Image (tube, helix red, strand yellow):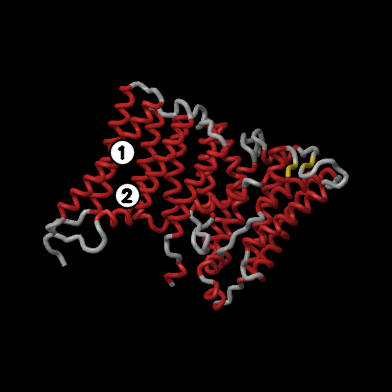
Amino acid sequence: MKIVAAQAPVGSLLSRVVGLFIAVVLTGASAGLGFYQNLPAQQVILYAAATLALVAWAWRFYVMQFAMPREGEINEGPSELRRAWLKYRGGIIGFLALLVIFAALSLMIDGFFNIWTVISALILLLIIILTMSVGRFMAENRSAFIGLMVLAGLFSVGSMNIDGFASPTNVKSMLLFASFLGLASVGQTLVALLGGLDLSIPYVIGSANVGLLYLIGLGVPTWLAFALIIMIGAVIGLINGILSLRLQGQALIVTLGTGFVISGGTQIVTSIGSAYSGNVFGTVPPWLSNLAAMNGSTFGLPFPPAIAIWVIAAVILIVGLKYTVYGRYLYALGVNRTSAERISISERTYWVSAFGISGAFSAFTGCLLLGWSGGGFIGVGSQFLFMTLAAVVVGGTSLLGGVGGYGFTVIGVLVLQVLTSFLVGIGLKFEWQQFIFGILILPMVALYARTPHIRTQI
């Protein structure tokens, strides 16, 4: 029912006052930060004016234009500001997180607050605005769209602020490290699509890294040692799948336990007769080094084969999950196991096979990392515990199962790698890198967790 809205101007005035207050506060903070870093007064005034204008415009465009009731209608239900918050909370949270990161970096790094970083911040803000505006037309691929926009923004910002960031050498380096993470995330994605998690990945990677060089040192032919390690990784994954299925899907605890067992057992075996524990020394064959070294070549082309392997694996997985029976059944189990079982889809087969694939790819990643580093180290996979989960979450694959895919994980991997390179390039310490990753991960988890799972809509 439409009636004249006599109180609409009151809400409009309130919105303007709140927007002006936020703009003034942020402008004051920007000016204070500039004077704190002893910047010229003219430069501080310019930045402050730009901040005031940008924030005021963004507030008016996204809160007032979309949240205000139409002419001749009364605003029934939630208040104007609450409706605006419910509709645009993702963009608002992203904007506030961007301000927090910008302020933290400006305080920590001398000379960070300059015209190029301000332009970079405006680019990221524009990406947030564009994501909010266009995202409603891409509801089915929202995660991919957001990830691609963030990836483009991060690369643009890095290219403007860090010398050599967009150089072929650095791009090749980012793709190489992304290939390690991408291959390690294959199993995590498949398991997550079923609603599980594999916490044994970093331990299998470290054990494979050490075990391969140990077998080579015993005189086992390199190709045979390579195949044996991948087979052992697959067996470990199958054990994880069987145990977690029998224990009512307690994959989190089961995989963590088997990870500790494998890591400890590997160190015990490889340290027999040696004064070292967790490290194995030896000579890595040239062909293995070529697979993952920065100076490696692929059929004469100047990039390591690990990148090509990741690309091929990604294409196979993306196509396979979308067009094959295995992929469709995997999604069906992730959506609703009971319904899938009633149409004769074996939960045991797909659950155990997903963990087996995870173990095999984890071991394969550990072997590639041996070619990159040239030495065996049991802790080489420690970073992949957090990073594989982060790649899956940032990409948009639901940890509840049934939603997402490896294509989304590829985007998540690239976002994390470009972000890591950017943070390293600006000289950020490791603990602050972890802080930034946390700021990135938490809103993404909150965003996807609030989305109703598909099984609740069937």
**Would you name the residue on which mark 2 appears?**
133
Residue at 25 percent across and 58 percent down: it is 79
**Cα distance between the residues tagged 1 and 2:** 26 Å
Write down the quadrant of residue 293 in the picture.
top right
User: Looking at the picture, how far across and down is residue 207, in whole percent?
Assistant: 73, 50
Query: In this rendering, does residue 407 appear at all?
Result: no
Q: Is residue 39 above or below residue 219?
A: above
Q: Is residue 403 above or below residue 148?
A: below
Q: Amino acid at mark 2?
A: Ser
User: Looking at the picture, how far across and down is residue 68, in whole percent?
Assistant: 21, 54
* Numbered badge on residue 438: none
The residue lying toward the viewer, choosing from 206 and 139, is: 206
User: Looking at the picture, how far across and down is residue 139, in whole percent?
Assistant: 38, 57
User: Looking at the picture, how far across and down is residue 144, in whole percent?
Assistant: 45, 51
| Secondary structure found at label 1 | helix
The residue lying toward the viewer, choosing from 114 and 331, is: 114
- The number of numbered discs placed on residues in the rendered structure image is 2
Upstream in sequence: badge 1 or badge 2? 1
**Would you name the residue on which mark 1 appears?**
25
Left or right of 208, for residue 194: left
Q: State the quadrant of the C terminus.
A: bottom left
Q: Looking at the image, do the residues carrying marks 1 and 2 touch, with CB atoms under 8 Å apart?
A: no
Query: In this rendering, does residue 112 appear at all?
Result: yes
Left or right of 270, for residue 345: left
| Secondary structure found at label 2 | helix
Q: Is residue 71 above or below residue 417?
A: below
Q: Amino acid at mark 1?
A: Val
Mark 2 is surrounded, within 10 Å at the Cα level, by few (under 14), some (14 to 19) or many (20 or more) other residues, namely few
Q: State the quadrant of the N terminus.
A: bottom left
Mark 1 is surrounded, within 10 Å at the Cα level, by few (under 14), some (14 to 19) or many (20 or more) other residues, namely few
Residue at 51 percent across and 42 percent down: it is 435
